[in-house]
Amino acid sequence: MSNRIHELLRQGEYAPQAVLDAARQNALQEHAQTLAYMERDLADGVAEAVFQDTEIFRGGFPELTDRLADLLDDTDFLTDLNERLSALGEAYAEDKDLMRMHFYKPDKVAALFRQFAKPHQNYAAREGFHWSEYKKFITEDEINAYFTRGSNYSDSRLAIYSFFLNNEDKKERADFLKDHYGIGGSSHALCGADDSHEDHDGRGIALERGPYGNPDASVHLNWNQAAGRIDQLIRDSEYLKSADYSRMPAYERERMAMRVMGFYHHLPNDVERPYPQDLYHEEGRKALVEKLADTELSAELLEQMDNALLSVPLDSEEYERKAESLSILHQYVEGTYTIFPEKKQAVEIAVPEQGQISMFDFMEQEPQSKEQSTAAAVENSQKAKVVARYQSTVMMQAGYIEDIAILQYPEPALQPLPLDAANEYNALKERYPDVLVGYEQYGNFEFYGEDAKHVSELLGSKLLEKETALGKVEVSGFPREQWVSQAMKLWKQGENVYLSGQQEDGTHAQTKYFRREEYLPVNTIVELDDREFRVDSVNFEQGTVSLQDMTLAKEAWYPIFRTEPLEYIRHLYEQADVPMEEAVEITVFTALYNAGVAYEDFSPEQMDGTFQASRWIAAIRLSPTLTEPCASTAISCWKMR
């Protein structure tokens, strides 16, 4: 984005001259305002110790900021100020009491002013350049950002996240959101923009940009649509913020504490409560959270609750509900229950539809067929080592106690790699040095060395060691039956993947070559919000796609870019039935890219001629893939003119 802005500035096509002329003064005013606000937040006596003259901060706005802006435009004053701000920033790092309020932190302000002190460059707009007016709109990113705020309640995101993990029914999710959000609204709803607001009620959520009652753009989502969008954000791991994951354990204990209180609700008054009772239950909740965080205290708590359950008649409706709640609390303390079941995915085994467990998966035992008898299962268990044994604290039917054993199975044996196979693999790796090469052996696609480490990290598969004719090597991979799904997982993360499959005669041939650039080709045209967008670039590391709004580019001749999730645009790309006209458009933009020029460098008449020539050749050749030479020739002609 920064490079694109600099490019437009150099071309004189970023802003009109009047805006560029005002940029320096705007920057002075903004920094003056920041300095004034920070000075007012300093503790008593600190400003006098930091600044040579505190009289410059006297008075009100806008006279104060005008005075500071004039001073900041003086190089000597700015140099002296930066030295004082740097010293204040270092002192603040040691003593936070230097500030009464911590919004304008001195270390951050010092860094901001050091950057401001660097020499500035003046830019000039191209003669006659002006901004084209275009209709205001609300982007998908802004809608997603609104939902990732959660509702107006504390821990809202965690509450919604937990409910969605434990309830997959669409109607239940929609009803939950409707009740959770309630009725209300807020300003600054779209990424903090001051001209935006939102309202929510029983019908759904309305997002608007512009004046109340007469917005320039609006989006309305009913609760089913809201639930669907949140579900997609959760699937893409974009709903929670990093602080939410740190908050999860404490939040879960608080929810379990509320479950304990709910258990004692409606019990006779003579049943002792294991927590202090206060009007708003704050002290009781805190006491229960502390107990649940301690192993011994939580065991005592459960024992007391077990005894309390005896006071509830077995034939009452309350008994079943309280018994179920108590069972969940037992499981939580034992570590077998969580309101965030996704947290356990890191240690779960991904079993394919065929039911086969790969030797590269987390577990180290061989799969058992459904036909195996109990005797065979016992025989197999005798080959394993018992590493732990414990008894469940939950009473089973007829008074039996569940006895649980943790078994460890020996490492699976990998067949060695013969010399001819090792040489064939090395030849493939030399041919595809920057590609993950999967070489089929004994029904598995195997990756070796550094490829194995990378595949193991990306897929979460087991990293083993294998004997080859050339020595030991690290290996990872997946069964042949899983090659489509597993290779796709690597491909969607931006990896080049070459799979060499074993034929019936023992020789190897290409099964599939997944090329990184083909996952979402640059210059592909997709339709989004009833407008056409061109794929400008793909960032696999961040999982994003940069799109150019071609509808606005054609109408206003001004480049507008936006960023969308990679998987979302890939989905649109997979669903699209690319017609001849779109294929021609892709090849024209590819020709523009290869020629090092932009769509905006040519007049509408020139581009219309280029498209017409490309359509004509495509119609003759009956193949849009042959239009690029024609498009390149036309573009070269326009460049020479």
Image (cartoon, rainbow, N blue to C red):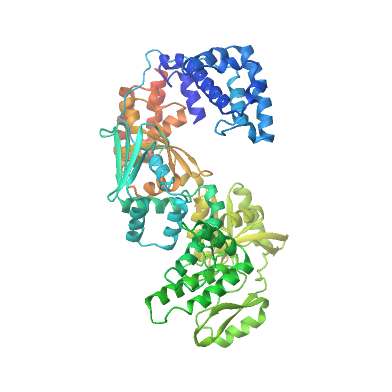
Given residues 352 and 181, the one toward you in this image is 181
418 horizontally vs 338: left or right: right
Q: Is residue 308 above or below residue 82?
A: below
Furthest residue to the left?
A: 214
Given residues 399 and 386, the one toward you in this image is 399
Given residues 169 and 594, the one toward you in this image is 169
Q: Quadrant of residue 80?
A: top right
Q: Is residue 332 above or below residue 18?
A: below
Circle count: 0
576 horizontally vs 4: left or right: left
Q: Quadrant of residue 55?
A: top right
491 horizontally vs 591: left or right: right
Furthest residue to the front?
A: 270
Given residues 612 and 103, the one toward you in this image is 103
**Image quadrant for the C terminus?**
top left
Q: Residue at x 54, y 48 (%)?
A: 243
Can residue 24 be seen by looking at this rendering? Answer: no
Residue 36: x %, y % from top left: 54, 22
Residue 287: x %, y % from top left: 56, 61
Can residue 171 be seen by looking at this rendering? Answer: yes
Q: Is residue 343 above or below residue 365?
A: above
